[in-house]
Image: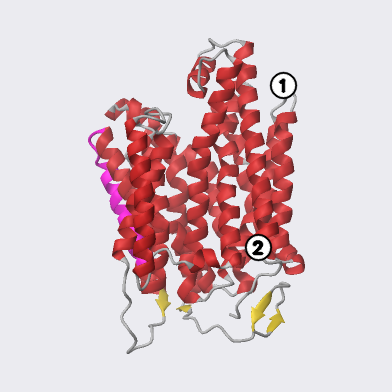
């Protein structure tokens, strides 16, 4: 096929894209709605985490409170590909409105929870809606804007995450201290109601061709994806934590998940409109980006999970100051993402992403070289640089993939790369948790894990030897994250085409 140059240095088919486009009578109102919807998802984890002591004090269930987060994230992860395909089949508007409504229903039920088991169950309901929020917002953003303008809307969405990372803990703490923890869920209702009104009033999608075949939904595939993903991710999240890796719960979940993988392959091959279509992995561009962003999920675990512990245990910072050390990367990330268009217009999507993840690899590898115990500004500076590097990495890949597919495939492609990133985070948390605990056991004579050591440090009952052990454990995790970043670099170098085949808008 003949190809011609585009302004961003990529290639595109000379044949115009005939995909359906999304229209709106007030694009600014729709963008406001998308930012509100994304704020619901972005605020969720950070605002809940600060109220955990009050929630446990009221409802009990300290031994299982971590499922307030694990249950939600599992539900989000396994529903991402389902919502992506549904948005391609029925349109973005009904999927986003339905997902937001489910999320708000879950929020209301969480506020009414009478014990910890009920709250965990309702958080899973929230997650069932949350899977629609993340993927569909990113897809709609690409629908609304041509390639040249997509970095602007994507940077705005990234800014929502940055603001939420800073404002979420503060807002959650204020509500828990001066009102009631139930308000951290009730506050979602007015925000979501405004978003729903804006979407219903101002977002208009052109109708599909009349007289064509009625879309067929692969409900069997959707259910299998949900159960299979849930079983495998549950085995990974809880293995070695709630039960030993070789215990019957782990083996049962892993065996069930693997059997369902086989069943899923059979179902998807026979489905007319599969939830997980094979073209997602047959196309070099999307397959390479899926692998690269799966590795990014691993990379993100090191700072988000382990840096606060390092800041408090090794540097001796208070929780608020430790949170600031982490939050600075959410400030540089959206700025770098917004500026990335000036880079990929000159050198292309792949080379820009490789520049970003290559720099991130060096930054992560430099973390273990920090002096012990060191000064707080040192890891803060590294996190600021890491956010800037990852902004150059993720957004060009997201925009690049969305630009290689038409309207009818964009939801599936977007959900695919987000699903891989979420799965990478889940697997990374389990893998790096095992690494950290293994280093601690080695340094402390075969006893202790990161949670127990952190509690001892908080109570002032730990020695300098223990603090050094924590530093070594976190250093090992950062080296592992550097290895994951290097794998992402190699995936792009060896698998991704030098120039993405961008479709004409």
Dot placed on the residue nearer the N-terminal end, 1 or 2: 1
Image-based side of 157 in relation to 36, left or right: right
Give the extent of the magenta segment: 95-115
Asked if residue 202 shows in the view, the reply is yes
Q: Is residue 1 magenta?
A: no
Residue at left 50%, top 69%? 279
Up-down relation of residue 269 to residue 53 (above or below): below
The structure's colour scheme is secondary structure
* Residue 327, quarter of picture: top right
Instruction: Give me the C-alpha separation between circle 1 and circle 2.
Output: 40 Å
Residue 272 place in picture, x, y as percent: 35, 73
Toward the viewer: 402 or 499?
A: 499
The tally of labels here is 2
Quarter the C terminus occupies: bottom right
Q: The residue tagged with tag 1: helix, strand or loop?
A: loop
Image-based side of 323 in relation to 29, left or right: right
Name the outermost residue toward the bottom. Answer: 211
Residue at left 64%, top 84%? 1
The residue wearing badge 1 is 372
The residue wearing badge 2 is 496
How crowded is the residue under tag 1: few (<14 C-alpha within 10 Å), some, or many (20+)? Answer: few
Asked if residue 128 shows in the view, the reply is no
Q: Is residue 114 magenta?
A: yes
Toward the viewer: 212 or 158?
A: 212
């Amino acid at each position: 096929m003949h190809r011609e140059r585009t302004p961003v240095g990529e290639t595109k088919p000379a044949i115009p894209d005939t995909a359906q486009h999304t229209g709106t009578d007030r694009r600014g109102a729709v963008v406001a709605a998308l930012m509100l919807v994304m704020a619901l998802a972005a605020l969720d984890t950070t605002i809940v985490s600060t109220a955990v002591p009050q929630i446990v004090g009221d409802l009990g269930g300290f031994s299982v409170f971590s499922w307030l987060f694990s249950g939600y994230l599992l539900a989000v992860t396994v529903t991402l590909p389902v919502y992506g395909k549904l948005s391609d089949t029925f349109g973005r508007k009904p999927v986003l409105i339905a997902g937001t409504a489910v999320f708000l229903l879950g929020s209301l039920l969480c506020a009414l929870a009478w014990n910890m088991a009920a709250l965990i169950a309702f958080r899973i309901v929230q997650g069932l809606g949350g899977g629609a929020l993340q993927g569909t917002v990113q897809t709609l953003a690409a629908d609304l804007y041509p390639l040249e303008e997509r970095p602007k809307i994507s940077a705005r969405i990234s800014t929502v995450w940055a603001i939420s990372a800073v404002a979420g803990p503060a807002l959650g703490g204020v509500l828990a201290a001066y009102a009631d923890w139930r308000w951290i869920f009730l506050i979602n209702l007015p925000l979501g109601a405004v978003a729903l009104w804006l979407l219903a009033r101002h977002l208009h999608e052109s109708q599909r061709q009349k007289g064509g075949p009625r879309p067929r939904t692969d409900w069997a595939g959707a259910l299998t994806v949900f159960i299979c993903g849930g079983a495998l991710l549950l085995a990974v999240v809880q293995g070695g934590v709630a039960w030993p890796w070789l215990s019957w719960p782990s083996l049962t979940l892993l065996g069930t998940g693997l059997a369902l993988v086989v069943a899923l392959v059979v179902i998807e091959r026979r489905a007319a409109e599969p939830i997980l279509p094979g073209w997602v992995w047959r196309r070099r561009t999307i397959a390479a980006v899926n692998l690269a962003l799966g590795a990014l999920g691993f990379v993100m675990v090191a700072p988000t999970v382990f840096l606060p512990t390092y800041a408090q245990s090794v540097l001796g910072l208070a929780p608020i100051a430790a949170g600031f050390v982490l939050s600075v990367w959410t400030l540089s990330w959206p700025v770098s993402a917004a500026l990335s268009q000036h880079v990929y217009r000159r050198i292309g999507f792949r080379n820009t992403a490789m520049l970003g993840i290559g720099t991130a690899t060096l930054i992560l590898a430099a973390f273990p070289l920090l002096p012990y115990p060191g000064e707080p500004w040192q890891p803060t500076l590294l996190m600021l640089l890491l956010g800037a590097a990852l902004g150059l990495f993720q957004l060009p890949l997201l925009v690049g993939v969305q630009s290689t597919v038409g309207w009818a495939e964009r939801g599936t492609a977007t959900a695919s790369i987000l699903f891989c990133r979420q799965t990478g985070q889940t697997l990374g948390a389990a893998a790096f948790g095992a690494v950290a605990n293994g280093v601690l056991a080695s340094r402390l004579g075969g006893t202790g894990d990161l949670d127990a050591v952190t509690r001892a440090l908080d109570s002032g009952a730990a020695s300098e030897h223990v603090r050094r052990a924590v530093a070594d454990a976190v250093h090992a995790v950062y080296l592992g994250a550097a290895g994951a970043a290097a794998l992402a670099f190699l995936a792009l170098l060896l698998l991704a085409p030098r120039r993405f085949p961008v479709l004409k808008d």
